[in-house]
Amino acid sequence: MAQSRPFTRRSLLGAALLGATGVAAGCGSAGIPPEPGIGRSGGEAATPETPGTPAGSADSSPSATAEATNAEIIARATVPVLCYHQVRPYESGDTSYSKQLLIIEPARFREQLDAIKGAGYTTITPDDYLAHLTGGAQLPEKPVILSFDDGKDNQPEVALAAVAERGMKATWFIMTTVIGNPGWTTKAQIRQMAEAGMTIGAHTWDHHDVRKYKGKDFTIQFDEPREKLQELSGQPVDTFAYPYGAWNPAALPHLEKAGYRTGFQLSDKPIDGRHPLMTLRRSLTASDWTGEQVVAKLREIAQKA
C-alpha cells in the first residue's frame, strides 16, 4: 500500500527494533520475499523501467555525476558485489529462510573469505568502483566488493575482525533508526569500522521500501541518514543500498540530490540506462556456500555482467 503521508517515526521504531528480539533483520531481495515477521514493508520485484527508455538501455549522454557516458559506465559495471547480513551461530528461532540467506555462521564466513582471497580476488571500495566506472581507473585483476546490510551488532563484533585480519575491505550499509539499540551497531562501532579503513554506507532511516516514498519521505530516508552517518563515521557517506534491493525510477533523482554517488540494488535486473551509478548490482551470498562455491559464484557474476 502506498504511503499517503510522510512516515511517522514513533510508529515505525517498534517495527525496526524487532530484529533485536531474535528475528533476523534482512533485506530479502527483489525476487525473494523479505524475512517474515520483522514488521517492515516488503513488496514485489522492482520495476526499474524508465519511461521512454527500456531498462538497461543506455543513452549516449554523460551521466550527471560522471565523466564517462552512461553506456561506458554500464559496460564497465562488471565487478561482483556480495551482500551479507548477520554473521553468527544459528539460534533455535531462526527460520530456514534466515539460515539460507540472512545468517551465516562465523566458521563458514571465514571459509568463504579465505577462498575469495585464495582465488586471487582483491576487495575494493565503492569509491574505487566509482573511479573505474566514471574515469576508467584501473582495478585489480579480480576485484570484488564485500557488503553488509542493516547494522546488526554481530557485524562489527564478528565480521569486522574476520575481514580486517585478512587485509580485506568491506562496506557496511547501516539503517540509522536502530543505531545504539540492543542488538544493533553502536555509534562507537561505526567510528571503529571507519577508522579500520572500512566504508560506511546508508541503508535508509528504517528500511522502508523506497518505491513507496512521497514528499518528506525522501528527506527522512535519504538525506538525514547520510548526514548522521557522516557525523558518526567522520568520512563522506556517498554510497547507498536499497532495502530489499528494490527501487523505482522516481526515487533515483532524489538519491542523487541527497549527495549519493553510487546506489546498489539487489537483483539481476538491468542497470538503469539513465541512472547507471544508482542501480549497480549486488548478489545475496548463500550461507551454505562452500569456499569453492562462492568463488564459482564470483566468476559467474563477472561473466553475466
Image: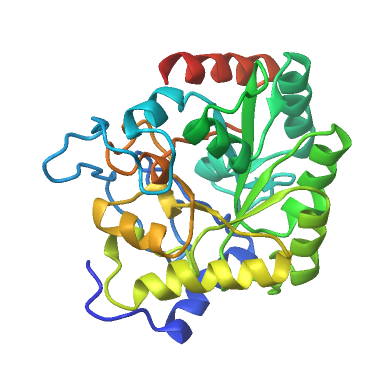
Taking the image as shown, residue 27 lies to the left or right of residue 140, namely left
Q: Is residue 265 visible?
A: no
Instruction: Say left or right for 187 vs 44.
Output: right
Image coords of residue 66 (percent x, y): 43, 42
Above or below, comparing residue 295 to residue 245 in the picture: above
| Residue 298 appears left or right of 5 | right
Q: Is residue 160 above or below residue 163?
A: below
Is 151 situated above or below 280?
Answer: below
Which residue corresponds to the image point at 37% horizontal and 46% vertical from the top-left? 33
Q: Say which quarter of the image contains residue 182.
A: bottom right
Q: Nearer the viewer, residue 66 or 127?
A: 66
Residue at the extreme right: 165
Q: Can the viewer see residue 192 in this picture?
A: yes
The image shows residue 106 at horizontal and vertical percentages of 77, 38
From the image, which quarter does the N terminus lie in? bottom left
Where's residue 187, x and y in %? 74, 71
